[in-house]
Amino acid sequence: MKVVLITTITPAAENIRGTSALPYHLLVKRNDDIKVDIYTFNLNRLPNEKIQAVQKELHANIHLLNVPKWMDWMEKPYMLMLRVFMRYPITSYLRLDNKAAAAIKASHPDGIWIFGEEIGRLMTSFPEYKRVHIGPDSEALYYYRMLGQRFVTESRSMLLRQMVMYPKYLQLEREYIADKNAVYYVVGEADAAFIKRMNPNCRSEFLRHPHYEIGADVKDIKFHTPIRLLIAGQYNYYMQQDANALVEAMVQHGGRALRSSYELTFLGKGWDRHVNELKENGWNVKNIEFAPDYIEEVRRHDIQITPISIGTGTKGKVLDALANGLLVIGTPFAMENIAVENNKSCIVYKNATEVLDILSQITAQREKFEQMATNGRKCVLEEHDRKKISQQLFDTFTH
């Protein structure tokens, strides 16, 4: 079988200025008999030596597509007002030139795979082929959710951005084609349902996010004394609202017994204020802004708390923690689209004070929660396996 991938960003083993890891890991474990040509606009600006390395790693040919010069011009700050009035997001105006389109068709592929929500309209350029589009998320759902957040309404600039971008992406998704030979995959169940609700005739389906960041050995899951807590990620608007509430609860209601049972690490930038506040109130806490080996740093811990306030799709840092044996305590947004079950292989919490109750229970019933972490690791390693999900993707072209 031969498949042509047309993508806004060039695949790479890690995310480089975009979600480049997702297409990479859907490709790297594919069956040996699947040949792939990659046509990329390279908006994540991978240098030539990196592109050459990726070609070898993926056993695929990579062809660079022309990006029109006017797109660079449109990125200038003084062009922002003009972009506000454009019907679609700027990247959606990318087109294949005639030479590239002819070369793709001349290679006689069995299917066309398009990666990047903004270029989904390229599906219409290949009506004679089976086609797959991977978003990877519904951007319209993301902006829809943002418009319902209190912290967004407190910032005029942020609110204006959501109000401008939401209709652009909504229009894109409403124009997804209705064709039995065209599938729109997203790594979120709510994302797929949202697209289907906005565009009932298109074939929108959920695809689990493959996981790939696993330590060299499978560690025994046995909590340390004191138990090591982790909050991973930058302090930004994805976490701001729920992280603030969590730290406030820890300061106000974290008693002496709880403080002595845990040590907390923030892994990421922007947490200085929270670290100082917790230290002043007796918590054993530190901040690591950057870890040279992120996964090994995660594996040093027992429990990850993930206070994500907003988002869509699948959260990579949650998959990292689960796959490497940490018990994850997270908000509903943090845990959505991952093959784990509340109180069996993870813990989903609704408010910050609930987290403190959970932490108290863990100190009294360590073995119960160690087993929960073991269950979580097993679920992710089995259900988010790269080869399994790659097979599901490429089977689309043969059914």
Image: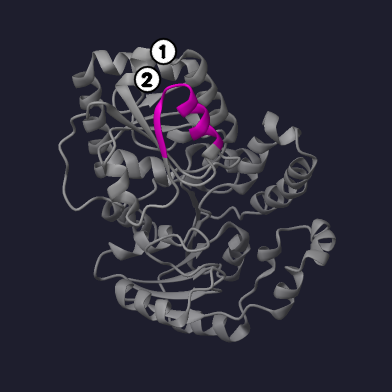
Q: On the image, numbered disc 1 is attached to which residue?
A: 255
Are the residues tagged 1 and 2 within 8 Å (C-beta)? yes
Q: Position of residue 111 (x, y in %)?
A: 43, 68
Left or right side of 333 for 169: right
Q: On the image, numbered disc 2 is attached to which residue?
A: 259
Residue numbers of the magenta segment: 273-286
**Residue 148 at least partly seen:** no
State the mark number for residue 346.
none
Mark 2 neighbour density, 10 Å: few (under 14) some (14–19) many (20 or more): some
Q: Nearer the viewer, residue 23 or 246?
A: 246
Image point (52%, 28%), residue name: 277
- The quadrant of the rendering that contains the N terminus is bottom left
Q: Is residue 66 magenta?
A: no
Q: Position of residue 50 (x, y in %)?
A: 41, 76
Where 387 falls versus 103 (above or below)? above
Q: Nearer the viewer, residue 52 or 208?
A: 52
Left or right side of 231 for 199: right
Image point (55%, 82%), residue name: 100
